[in-house]
Amino acid sequence: MKKILTAIAIICTLTAYGQTAQDYYNSGGDKATAQDFAGSIKDFDKAIKLDPKYTSAYYNRGTSKMYLKDYKGALADFDKAIELKPDFLNAFTNRGVAKLKLDDLKGAIQDFDAAIKLDANNASAYFMRGQVKMQMQDMDGGCKDLTKAKELGDTRADKFLQQYCGSQTTATTENKSNESLMIDWPDEDWRVANQQDNAEQTMIELLRNKETFDNWTEIGTMFVYKGVSASKKIPITNTMDFLSENAKKTCPTAKVTMIEKDESAKYPWIIFKIECSSSKEAESQVWYAIQGTNELYVNFRGVKKETIPADLQDKWVKFFKTAKIVAQ
């Protein structure tokens, strides 16, 4: 029996040592598909160790690192993939995303430019470049890129076009100017579920991709109140008072709490929360209002809870404070 066990051990060892770079690469791909990104990276490591010029292994390892938010590590892998294959289209696109995550906006633009040069119909590159241009306050260029991305079939562009490009309105007051609120919803699985526009306001409602207005767990809403001019010098706290009164019409015991504000900023803003536990269905929201030159922008994120959990409140407050008004 001892001799048989020894033989089996030798066979297993030989099988393990017989794995090729291709075998490890395939295994890494399977693990990435199963969202085991840490495991996929280990297999891509082994593939690269056996074949230091395995271009696709560098690229896929970089992609797995992106999912784990190791953007510096991903950047190094995409650099190597492009070094080995200078016309590696997807590597340029993903490297642009990695640079964007590392706040290298100019570098990201350069990579998306390169990707578009390699493939003029690269919808993803137009989509990403459009977002970067908006962050660099090139709203016109950003909207053009997003429009191109949509024409090429990238449905992700719809949300941003409606959110940033469709809501840019011309003020009707004396100091006419175009302006918009740039606010980047951080999760990729939001969709525009409803949009309404009239002479007085624009409203956009967002839901999670698989949710409806009947079964939502988290909702986002954006309002643009047109012609509400900063020259009237209405305190931003009045917006909180007005919205609070509206909330109490449906939930008389709604609790309103001011979280943070800056009335002396160029564009005064306020963040507050409204929590309701006595209605037929509990709902709590974190609100953000900011006064533009000629428009008032009001946004909220809500959940079906009696109160806002502290970690969720912190997350939403940080999210809203990344918003900025862009004037053209």
Image (cartoon, rainbow, N blue to C red):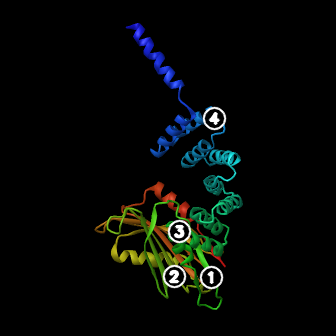
Which residue is located at x 65 percent, y 63 percent? 116
In this rendered view, identify the residue nearer to me: 217 or 46: 46
Residue 211 visible in image: yes
Q: Which residue is mark 1?
A: 178
Mark 1 or 4, closer to the camera? 4
Q: Nearer the viewer, mark 3 or mark 4?
A: 4
Q: CA distance from mark 3 to mark 4?
A: 39 Å
Q: In terms of secondary structure, where does tag 2 sit?
A: strand
Query: Which amino acid is tagged 3?
Result: Ala
Q: Amino acid type of disc 4?
A: Asp
Q: Which residue carries the number 4 mark?
A: 51
User: Which is nearer the N-term, disc 2 or disc 4?
Assistant: 4
Q: Which residue is mark 3?
A: 157
Give the CA separation, mark 3 to mark 1: 21 Å
Q: Nearer the viewer, residue 257 or 66?
A: 66
Q: Find out whether the residues at labels 1 and 4 contact each other: C-beta distance under 8 Å.
A: no
SS class, disc 1: strand
Label 3 vs label 1, nearer the camera:
3
Mark 1 vs mark 2: in front: 1
